[in-house]
Image (cartoon, grey):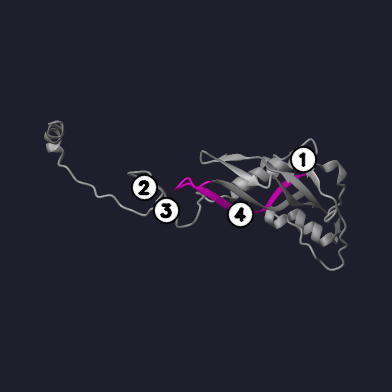
Amino acid sequence: MVRRNAGEGERSGRAGTAAERRPRSGTPGSAVTGTLGATLLRVTSFSLRQVKLRPGEEHREALEVELAPFEFGGQRYLPVPEQVTAELVVSRALTGTLFTLRFRTRLHGPCYRCLGDAVLEVPIDAREYQASTPDDEELLTPYVVDEQLEVSAWARDAIVLALPDKILCRPDCAGLCAVCGKNLNDEPHTHEHETVDPRWAALEALRREV
């Protein structure tokens, strides 16, 4: 748990965006406690009842978060490993609570262009804010339900938001040949196309039958 002076907590409470609400760590005179580095717990959700904070304080905990396979662009991708070590930070401000989730994962699945094996490293640094007395739905996070933080659901959505438009086996992937379907990375080639005047198409078809 990190205790900060009242000035820092007040600034955090007045900030207008999630990034601005993030309390700054490592301030002079702060004392850090928590479970980071202790035995990891495998979780899909985290009970907020066990964290009692005052404005300006934060709680850090290392969790082993379960990640489920998911579909992206009509293709199935597998997080490897299925459990990742994540750092969860719960920071209390005057007007609400800021949640920070950090971890790295590796996705395995098909390349968008050639359908070969693709591996993508995905670093996650996600934040969610929950206002104490919200007057706007944007100040609520969908991952807090009945004082439970749905960590796995949040982690999965954070991965999806961090993905590029196309997952490729390599940046210069040549893809598949549009004519024969072969992998152009393994067999670079071109096809010569014979252009036929559509007015002679019927005669050309008759010629082939003879």
Three-letter code for the amino acid on which mark 3 is drawn = Asp
Which region shows up in magenta? 110-132
Residue 196 falls inside the magenta stretch: no
Mark 1 vs mark 4, CA separation in Å:
24 Å
Q: Are marks 4 and 3 in contact (CB under 8 Å)?
A: no
Residue at point 15%, 31% (across, down): 209
Mark 2 vs mark 4, CA separation in Å:
27 Å
Observer-side mark, 4 or 3, equals 3
Identify the residue under disc 3: 186
Identify the residue under disc 2: 177
Q: Are marks 2 and 3 in contact (CB under 8 Å)?
A: no
Residue 112 falls inside the magenta stretch: yes
Identify the residue under disc 4: 121
Mark 1, secondary structure of its residue? loop
Identify the residue under disc 1: 45
Three-letter code for the amino acid on which mark 1 is drawn = Ser
Q: Are marks 1 and 4 in contact (CB under 8 Å)?
A: no
